[in-house]
Amino acid sequence: MYYETLKYYLDLFDNGEREFAYRAESIPEHAEWKKALRSRLREITGLDKCVPCAPKHEYGGEEEINGFRAEKHTLRTEPGVVMPFFLLRQEKRGEAACPVLIVPHGHGGGKRETLYYQCGLIREALEDGFIVACPDERGSGERREFPQQGDGEAQRRSNSHRELAQLGVCFGRTVIGGAVWDLMRLADWLLNLKEASGFLACAGMSGGGQQTLWFAALDDRVRAAITSGYFYGVRDALIEMPQNCACNYIPGFFETADMGELGALIAPRPFFVESGRRDPLAGKRGLDNVKEQLATAEKAYRLFGAKIVHSVHDGGHEWRGDGMRAFLAEARHDGA
Ligand SMILES: [Zn+2]
């Protein structure tokens, strides 16, 4: 016999309401809602507490990884916080106005793994003239804390999200708040490159899809967003499965909004959601738990006469990439 508490939390969710549940019926109502929800999300993720600093940048040479010529760079994003990232670009780019693509990684590695897991999209983006940046999220890759550091396979694939989540909650911060802040600072730097056009896209799988979703929801400079394996209702995916990584849990979020509202914050910017029909992380109801959240976000897109692209494959929790290249090309064309 176990006297569990999980059901209590499910009841809290079922009997409660999300304060910013999407109800806008017009574009002005949407604008007002967006401003208020963004402000709340900045507060509960601790984004507002991040400390601006002079963005000290350093170049650290280049490496050949999985056929890519990856330039290593570091950028200081807060006093005492340094983000390493790989930058990939065509050698003969001249002064052309290049679009920019950020590819944040998921769990199971850092920026180096991105060059394997998302290599198809990255290769296509480079062919299409993009500058591509693959950063390490706080707690992953070269940003692991001491309990996870080391070169063994298991250590390289681990992360320090639990450690950073525990410390962060005591300072009013979260892992995703720090990740979004760093992506914002990376965007500042990338959009300032002399060869960069103003077009910025972000694409990620799983934890990278999570970073993409939150970054695009909180920063309008993201002109197109691709999230794979991370767009589903929190009840089934995060409350019923509390064993998920600590970085998914934000103080007060389940009383504030759901994933659908994060999608609605991206409207009407081009938004691509990839889902696996058999992805266990979507929860026991699978795709239904994705479609309900899409329906919420689509209410916002409809107000603007725009649509979300939903690409469903028959696999599980995996990145396929079908249709992403065309999506980015169209987004660039429409945004030009
Ligand atoms: Zn995590």
Image (cartoon, rainbow, N blue to C red):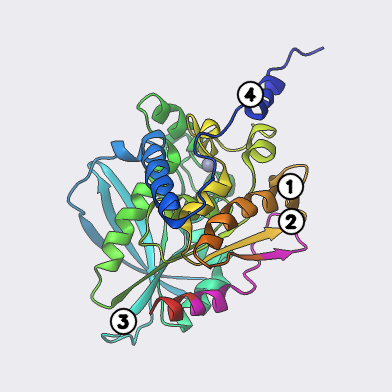
| C-alpha separation, residue under disc 1 versus residue under disc 3 | 41 Å
| Mark 1 vs 3, N-terminal side | 3
Query: The residue under label 2 is which amino acid type?
Result: Gly
Say whether residue 93 is left or right of residue 205. left
Query: The residue under label 4 is which amino acid type?
Result: Leu
Q: Nearer the viewer, residue 195 or 238?
A: 238
Could you classify mark 1 by the number of other residues whose Cα lies within 10 Å: few (under 14), some (14-19), or many (20 or more)?
some
Q: Position of residue 25 (x, y in %)?
A: 52, 52
Q: Nearer the viewer, mark 3 or mark 2?
A: 3
| Mark 1 vs 2, N-terminal side | 1
The disc at residue 316 is: 2
Image point 52% across, 60% down: which residue? 303
Q: Quadrant of the C terminus?
A: bottom left
Magenta region, residue range:
311-330
Residues at marks 1 and 3 touching, judged by CB atoms closer than 8 Å:
no
Q: Nearer the viewer, residue 183 or 285?
A: 285
Residues at marks 3 and 2 touching, judged by CB atoms closer than 8 Å:
no
| Mark 2 vs 4, N-terminal side | 4
Q: Quadrant of the N terminus?
A: top right
Which secondary structure, mark 3? Answer: loop
Say whether residue 263 is left or right of residue 11. left
Residue at label 3?
Answer: 97
